[in-house]
Amino acid sequence: MKIGELAAATATKVETVRYYEKIGLLASPARSSANYRSYGSEHLARLSFIRRARDLGFSLEVVRELLTLADDRTESCEAVDGIARSHLSEIDRKIADLSALRRELGRVLDSCSCDTIADCKIIDALAPRR
Amino acid sequence: MKIGELAAATATKVETVRYYEKIGLLASPARSSANYRSYGSEHLARLSFIRRARDLGFSLEVVRELLTLADDRTESCEAVDGIARSHLSEIDRKIADLSALRRELGRVLDSCSCDTIADCKIIDALAPRR
DNA sequence: CCTTGACCCTGTAGTTACTACAGGGTGCAG
DNA sequence: CTGCACCCTGTAGTAACTACAGGGTCAAGG
Ligand SMILES: [Zn+2]
Ligand SMILES: [Zn+2]
Ligand SMILES: [Zn+2]
Ligand SMILES: [Zn+2]
């Protein structure tokens, strides 16, 4: 499997695959006689895992941890559960932050019934001291 | 007003103030005999505007536009309103994305009643092909 | 046989919005 | 006069890619 095929199979860009290899997230594959990367099914499984974790919002650093944990099949899954739970609460925090932002921006926008910049409530809201 | 005072007055780091100057967002102030930056109230107003807009989630590029618009007091505020509205819908999109993520991760987490990595549902969810 | 186009390679630089030094100079209190 | 807090410039680092530049390889069509 050449890099383009692997990339297509995982909805990843070729450059991103090479990037994951460079930072040590994806093992270096064998090379063909033309020095082309040659991937096997284990690379496909690994990259699928990475992409799915990324889609769920885990950082690359956390993905690295998850991969290490996933490899030790006999270990307790407490660590995995903990990572997932703390990630969930981080997402909750982000949603709360964005919702607060949304409320405030909505409030600012609702106050707009102006004609020129001189009396624009949005500009006023940004520059409270004028 | 020295840079440290300006920074304190706007809850900004000194380095950030210098950074805003470097990228042309904040005008270069006069210098003291010791080559220290010397700010006036116009700088304070400008930086306050920038910080407030940043707090509302506008990108620096958009803040730059807003500053330009804010300076032309006779212009219609249509452009400002448009920027704010499109920013609001971007925030809504982000909230929706995060909420979908939250639902999916929550679903994955709820399925966890496992002992070892070998049968961990979270790991399974990340690596669908096994 | 040759060429054209789609791939592949390495290495570097750009993106956002800062932040953190390193290696200096200045100003004031004790 | 000697700390110490503050100021200066310039560079490099962060996250997670993305986009070239400047090459090599391979299969198909003319
Ligand atoms: Zn308006
Ligand atoms: Zn307006
Ligand atoms: Zn569990
Ligand atoms: Zn588990």
Image: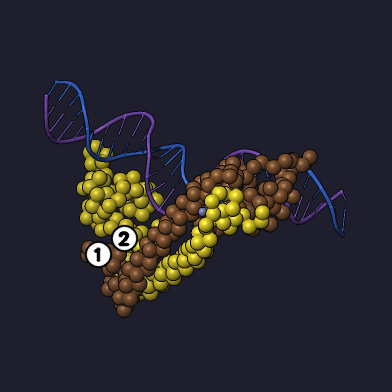
Chain colours: A yellow, B brown, C blue, D purple
User: Which quadrant of the view contains residue B109?
Assistant: bottom left
Quadrant in which the C terminus of chain B is drawn: bottom left
Quick check: can you spot residue B52? no
Element type at mark 1? loop
Callout 1 crowding tier (Cα within 10 Å): few <14, some 14–19, many ≥20: few
Q: Chain of mark 1?
A: B
Is D10 displayed left or right of B35 in the figure?
A: left
Residue placed at 31% from the left, 60% from the top?
A52
Which disc is residue A52 wearing? 2
Element type at mark 2? helix
Which amino acid type is shown beneath numbered disc 2? Arg
Q: Position of residue B106 (x, y in %)?
A: 35, 72
Is B8 displayed left or right of A45 in the figure?
A: right
User: Which quadrant of the view contains residue B107?
Assistant: bottom left
Q: B37 or A2: which is nearer to us?
A: B37
Q: Position of residue A107 (x, y in %)?
A: 52, 63
Residue placed at 30% from the left, 75% from the top?
B111
CB at mark 1 closer than 8 A to ligand 4? Answer: no
Q: How many marks?
A: 2
Q: B25 or B32: which is nearer to us?
A: B25
Q: Position of residue D8 (x, y in %)?
A: 69, 42
> Which residue has dot 1 on it?
B128
Instruction: Verify CB contact (< 8 Å) between mark 2 and mark 1.
Output: yes
